[in-house]
């Protein structure tokens, strides 16, 4: 699944092409995504895209009529800037042709993504966005915030930091990697962690996400960034998907278990 770094990489990739561009044609080849493509989507044809932002894993295109185009890449989606003449692939579902001669094309093999037109004056009040926790790379995400979120929770810390109400964008890969960097075992009850350990975890989450964004996201089976090239952060993963391989720090075999129905990896020596 494209995670926060992949979505941020996509945002940065498309921003120069779509900001200030007029949408000359909207093409919807298939509507039945996780939620149906908004029926009023074609009404923004001829309108201008004013800005491209991100909230958690959602891309938000601000339109000059005050509405917002929300795009979620789902489990396997991608958003590419291409030549409109390029042949449509089997799972290309939505195309937005721009006045600058480019086309923004949404590709989603599993159809778990979203293309919705939000009519709220403030898109952050929409049901999909209003209950989200702080952005991990912004100042609101602090050890104090995380300590309050963990205070009465006996759930595993990995599950707590993957909860979007606690902090957004810390998916399975990045949770495993951040916990390794912080030296914390993923199954540790959240309420048992001291503030100094949570401070280290906050710093580790910031570090691993920032590093991944700089490298262009994590290369998995389905992710491609906006120009069609894979990211390269997977080369630097310490524990994720390395079951039985030697820890890059101490050479102890990396362990694996299923936690909250998600594959979990850790080093039994480096993480306490």
Image (cartoon, grey):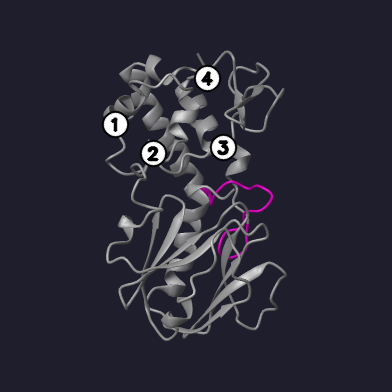
Q: Which residue occupies the foreground of this view, 33 or 238? A: 33
Kindly state the secondary structure of the residue where label 1 is placed. Answer: helix
Tags 2 and 1 in contact by the CB under 8 Å rule?
Answer: yes
> Considering only vertical position in the picture, is 206 above or below 12?
above
Label located before the other in sequence (1 or 3):
1
Judging by the rendered image, the residue that carries numbered circle 4 is: 187
The magenta stretch is: 214-229
Residue lying at 58% horizontally and 21% vertically, measured from the top left: 249
> Considering only vertical position in the picture, is 69 above or below 102?
above
Kindly state the secondary structure of the residue where label 2 is placed. Answer: loop
Residue lying at 56% horizontally and 50% vertically, measured from the top left: 2
Judging by the rendered image, the residue that carries numbered circle 3 is: 173
Can residue 181 be seen from the camera position used here?
Answer: no
Residue lying at 43% horizontally and 34% vertically, measured from the top left: 205
Which mark identifies residue 167?
2
Q: Which residue occupies the foreground of this view, 193 or 29? A: 29
Residue 166 screen position, x and y as percent: 38, 35
Q: CA distance from mark 2 to mark 1?
A: 9 Å
Count residues near mark 2 (Cα–Cα under 10 Å), then give few for <14, some for 14-19, many for 20+: many
Q: CA distance from mark 1 to mark 3?
A: 22 Å
Relative side of 238 to 65, left or right: right
Label located before the other in sequence (2 or 1):
1
Q: CA distance from mark 4 to mark 1?
A: 20 Å
Label located before the other in sequence (4 or 2):
2
Residue 271 screen position, x and y as percent: 52, 17
Residue lying at 37% horizontally and 41% vertically, measured from the top left: 136
Relative side of 237 to 157, left or right: right
Kindly state the secondary structure of the residue where label 4 is placed. Answer: loop
Judging by the rendered image, the residue that carries numbered circle 1 is: 145
């Amino acid at each position: 699944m494209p995670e926060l770094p992949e979505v941020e990489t996509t945002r940065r990739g498309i921003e120069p092409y779509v900001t200030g561009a007029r949408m000359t044609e909207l093409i919807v080849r298939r509507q039945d995504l996780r939620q149906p493509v908004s029926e009023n989507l074609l009404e923004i044809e001829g309108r201008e895209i004013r800005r491209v932002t991100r909230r958690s894993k959602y891309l938000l295109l601000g339109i000059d009529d005050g509405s917002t185009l929300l795009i979620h890449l789902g489990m396997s989606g991608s958003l590419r800037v291409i030549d409109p003449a390029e042949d449509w692939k089997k799972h290309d579902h939505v195309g937005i042709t721009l006045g600058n001669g480019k086309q923004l094309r949404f590709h989603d093999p599993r159809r778990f993504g979203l293309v919705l037109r939000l009519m709220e004056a403030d898109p952050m009040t929409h049901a999909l966005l209003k209950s989200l926790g702080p952005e991990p790379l912004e100042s609101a995400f602090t050890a104090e915030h995380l300590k309050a979120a963990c205070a009465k929770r006996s759930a595993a810390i990995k599950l707590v930091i993957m909860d979007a109400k606690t902090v957004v964008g810390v998916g399975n890969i990045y949770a495993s990697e951040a916990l390794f960097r912080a030296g914390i075992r993923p199954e540790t009850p959240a309420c048992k962690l001291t503030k100094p350990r949570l401070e280290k975890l906050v710093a580790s989450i910031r570090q691993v996400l920032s590093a991944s964004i700089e490298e262009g996201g994590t290369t998995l089976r389905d992710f491609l960034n906006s120009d069609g090239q894979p990211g390269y952060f997977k080369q630097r993963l310490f524990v994720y998907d390395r079951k039985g391989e030697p820890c890059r720090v101490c050479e102890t075999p990396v362990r694996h278990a299923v936690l909250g129905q998600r594959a979990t990896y850790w080093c039994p020596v480096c993480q306490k």
